[in-house]
Image (tube, rainbow, N blue to C red):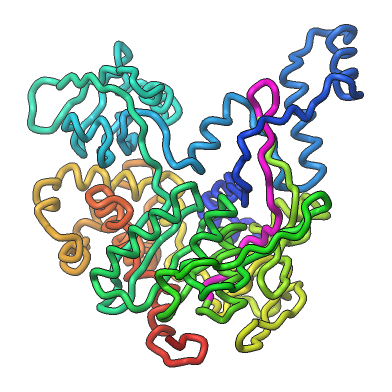
Amino acid sequence: MANNQNKWQPFIYSLLIGIGLLLGIILKPSGRISNIMGSNNKFSELLSIINQSYVDTVNMADIENRAINELLHELDPHSVYIPASDLKQANEQLEGNFEGIGIEFNIVSDTIMVVTALNGGPSQELGILPGDRIIKVDTIPVAGNGITSEKVFKLLRGPGGTKVDVLIKRMGTKEPILFSITRGKIPIFSVDAWFMLNQETGYIKVSRFAEKTHEEFLSAYQELKKEGIQHLILDLRGNPGGYLNTAIQLTDELLEDYKLIVYTEGRSKPRTDYKSERPGVFEKGKLVVLIDEGSASASEIVSGAVQDWDRGIIIGRRSFGKGLVQEPYGLSDGSAIRLTVSRYYTPSGRYIQKDYSNKTDYEHDLMSRFENGELEGNSDVIFDSTPYKTLRLGRTVYAGGGIKPDVFVPIDTSYYSRFLTESVASGLIGKFAYTFLDKNRVSITNIKPLKMFTDAYQISDAIYDEFINFALSNGVKQPSELDKQKSKAFIKLQIKALVARQIWRDKGYYSVIQSGDKAMQVALKKIAENSELMAD
């Protein structure tokens, strides 16, 4: 068992980190700040007594924060407390912007390397280029001194209108270049990629349901419409959720008018029905929604509505299983809580929240799915749920524990090896891709457009050998010949995709990676079939 766990460890950790940052499904705040901690209650009295009389000096703010966290954790796993210091960053992911200089970066060889200057941001306007190295921020040297991503954020982010001096070392120039950058509002996009997979089928990847996701989705769809889209693959894998209203808006684009999308209900919240209300941009055409164990809440609302109305096929693995709705409440010190106020139900009446009566089991649920073989297709794993019927074709679907896909695609473990595990755990594939592009930037960036790079450019066996030597020089153990061959195709594809990401951002990554994506291949095959479920 220990060896099996080690094999999975880096993959599990990356997944759990993503789930640990679940946005959930959140009602948009009304703007009214509520002080829920009145001064005349036992909690306030207790804190006052401790502050005045406890034998030792204590950090009262820390005690108060921990007490609130424990209280909310006892209610359910998704009611959370957000300290004032973290609230702005927590909201940025949903509001869709932050203030800074507008770069994507990676730390390579203890140096900040610019991956790209974001479109329309201050850095792009001043001419900062991919491959530039930041060696000093204001008066602080940041190269070769243990710089971390957290330190970079603190140095480069700041209120719009403020200035920061950035000293850059650029390939081909002898002297460093000094840029004085005025910080501005930088968009955070939630629709990561969109492109045509063939002459008829388009692909859209949505990473979360933020304030402007619907607007971004429509923009992406209009571009694909110009290229002749007739069928759509909507990728919600790894999407942890976000705003309820945004999920409803996006689903409205897929369903005919007056169809129930979702309804919510709670002790103090009467039932509220949300229906499709306006003509959608993709009410006709074959539709596939991709989900996995990282697809939660808002993602489950979209996939649940599509499944219940037999609008399309859900492909992948069982979703996370979160059927609770949170509402934000501001506290007097600038902190906030997101409190569970209602449950949501799919159009057929399914409540898909997995059991959280045993909090330890709940927190380890994803790990359990790995260990019991569910993600690899273990047929002995029982899906504990109640059957329901879809609303058009009367197919059997299930409640409890998430959305069960119509077509299961197991996680692919055929390329796993000790060599790959160690390389992934150390982030070496990404580091190699950055340094490889840096050495070959001119020749690779001359390959245009993206489709030509995707179709024609290959990571050769010689480049793969370079990666192996790179991994060995960074402490990875010498791989066996079997391990080299098992992981070869996967690593080569990842290197190519990560190189493409640096040039074309996420669109480049997903354009390349889809050729090795089994769920995508299954989706294309299903679209080619003429089943009643996939009828135009």
Say which of 214 and 340 sits in front. Answer: 214
- The image shows residue 287, relative to residue 53, as above or below, that is below
Residue 65: x percent and y percent? 73, 26
Q: Residue at x 59, y 73 (%)?
A: 259
Magenta stretch in the rendered image? 314-335
Q: Is residue 511 left or right of residue 393?
A: left
Q: Residue at x 38, y 54 (%)?
A: 216
Q: Is residue 523 left or right of residue 81?
A: left
- The image shows residue 304, relative to residue 164, as above or below, that is below
Q: Residue at x 51, y 53 (%)?
A: 209
Say which of 162 and 474 sits in front. Answer: 162
Residue 450: x percent and y percent? 19, 60
Q: Is residue 468 visible?
A: no
Q: Quadrant of the N terminus?
A: bottom right
- The image shows residue 69, relative to residue 289, as above or below, that is above
Q: Is residue 314 left or right of residue 500?
A: right
**Quarter-wise, where is residue 274 in the image?**
bottom right
Q: Is residue 354 visible?
A: yes
Say which of 260 and 296 sits in front. Answer: 260
Asked if residue 331 is among those painted magenta in the image, a careful observer would answer yes
Say which of 146 and 43 sits in front. Answer: 43
Residue 378: x percent and y percent? 63, 76
